[in-house]
């Protein structure tokens, strides 16, 4: 696609179904120019005309038919790599999940990661053999969307050209991204924050993650992979994190920390879900721990909003159930650190699993395919 055609396709992808007049207005195009640019996209099946409806009572019917993306025109693979396994999805062009699969990692070396992604790609493309691009995400630092410079969960501390290794193995273009950035891209284009030009994404689970979009642009720096928000102090009386910080976000909100605190109090090991179940049932030990964590989560949400001035925060991750079980404590933490006259925070709690993270990797691949280069900043 040429630059102008790509702009039309992107506008429809993000906002469709959308009328031709609206596309022309947003892109500052004449009606004739838009028709010239849209026609080959329709002829090739990327864009489709959809029913505009009308007012059945008045008998009016719109004469022009809006344009929308044909989501099945292209398919993408997204793979989320953890320290133990790989989760992958096959998606449409709007990141709709068509199929999913996962496999344990045979090892944490680059060759093992490549083998696992190749195996899953083979499984997922059995019924959809043609894919336009593969996206891979992992926790750590990624340079130029191809080279992993650090991946703590895999034990990688030296540069690994993962993108080129996978492209050679798969025979398909590959985009590699930090998992938090990939998840934020998916929420921005296809998820809970679609249509918002300023918002934050906070994840809680094995750790604490943070993504930020300002002025329709994702904040993409090498420090995204460091986990800086996990060191934010929240409770001066809280437990220690592995780095020795007392009461930081990691110490208060990670699944491991919550499990450890409840297990010590009950003198027996418990799972994360059991901690939350016990708190919901009024167990004094679990209730005290979960309430303190909920209040700390509220303070973290308030701090992010206060510093960035966003009004919407997408809260997700495997540990996000904490926000529901400790809802009153979360609200208390927000109100304690937020000015009374401030606009109320829109906290959108999104339940997720590793399929959700893999969909983020697919969204990165979609962005790269549509824009023709590195994933979008906006």
Image (cartoon, grey):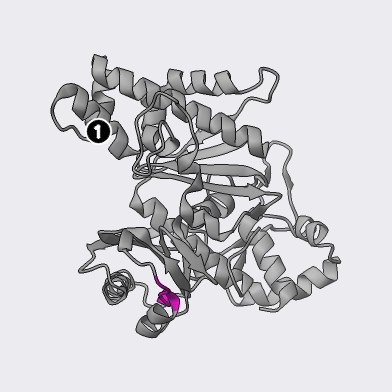
Q: Is residue 271 left or right of residue 349?
A: left
Q: Is residue 208 left or right of residue 289?
A: right
- Of residues 337 and 30, the one drawn nearer to the viewer in this rendering: 337
Q: Write down the residue under mark 1.
A: 260
Q: Is residue 29 above or below residue 324?
A: below
Q: Quadrant of the N terminus?
A: bottom right
- Of residues 28 and 53, the one drawn nearer to the viewer in this rendering: 28
Coordinates of residue 196 in the picture (x, y in percent): 65, 45
Residue farthest to the left, as pictured: 268
Q: Quadrant of the C terminus?
A: bottom right
State whether the magenta stretch is mostly helix, strand or loop.
Answer: loop
Looking at the rendered structure, the secondary structure element under dot 1 is helix
Residue farthest to the front, as pictured: 244
Q: Residue at x 74, y 38 (%)?
A: 58
Residue 76 appears in the figure = no
| Location of residue 7 (image quadrant) | bottom right
Magenta highlight range: 158-163
Q: Is residue 36 left or right of residue 354?
A: right
| Location of residue 238 (image quadrant) | top left
Coordinates of residue 305 in the picture (x, y in percent): 61, 34
Q: Is residue 73 above or below residue 288?
A: below
Q: Residue at x 52, y 40 (%)?
A: 314
């Amino acid at each position: 696609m040429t630059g102008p055609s790509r702009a039309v396709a992107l506008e429809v992808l993000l906002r469709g179904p959308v009328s031709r007049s609206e596309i022309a207005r947003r892109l500052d195009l004449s009606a004739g120019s838009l028709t010239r640019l849209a026609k080959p996209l329709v002829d090739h099946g990327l864009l489709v005309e959809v029913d505009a409806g009308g007012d059945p009572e008045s008998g009016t019917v719109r004469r022009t038919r809006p344009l929308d993306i044909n989501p099945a025109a292209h398919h993408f693979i997204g793979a989320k790599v953890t320290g133990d396994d790989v989760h992958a999805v096959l998606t449409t062009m709007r990141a709709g999940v068509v199929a999913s699969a996962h496999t344990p990692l045979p090892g944490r070396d680059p060759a093992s990661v490549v083998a696992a992604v190749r195996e899953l790609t083979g499984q997922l493309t059995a019924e959809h053999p043609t894919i336009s691009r593969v996206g891979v995400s992992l926790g750590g630092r990624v340079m130029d969307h191809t080279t992993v410079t650090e991946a703590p969960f895999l034990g990688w501390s030296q540069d690994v050209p993962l993108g080129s290794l996978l492209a050679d193995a798969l025979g398909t273009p590959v985009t590699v991204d930090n998992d938090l950035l990939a998840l934020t891209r998916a929420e921005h284009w296809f998820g809970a924050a679609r249509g918002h030009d300023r918002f934050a994404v906070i994840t809680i689970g094995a750790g604490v993650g943070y993504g930020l979009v300002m002025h329709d642009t994702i904040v993409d720096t090498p420090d995204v992979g460091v986990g800086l928000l996990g060191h934010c102090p929240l409770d001066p009386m809280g437990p220690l994190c592995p780095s020795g910080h007392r009461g930081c976000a990691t110490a208060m909100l990670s699944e491991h920390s919550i499990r450890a605190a409840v297990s010590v109090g009950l003198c027996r090991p418990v799972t994360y879900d059991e901690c939350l179940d016990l708190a919901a049932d009024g167990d004094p030990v679990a209730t005290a721990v979960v309430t303190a964590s909920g209040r700390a989560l509220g303070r973290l949400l308030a701090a992010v909003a206060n510093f960035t001035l966003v009004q919407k925060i997408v809260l997700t991750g495997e540990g996000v159930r904490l926000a529901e079980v400790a809802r009153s404590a979360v609200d208390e933490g927000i109100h304690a650190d937020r000015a009374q006259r401030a606009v109320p925070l829109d906290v959108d709690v999104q339940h997720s699993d590793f399929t959700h993270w893999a969909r983020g990797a697919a969204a990165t691949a979609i962005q790269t395919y549509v824009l023709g280069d590195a994933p979008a900043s906006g």
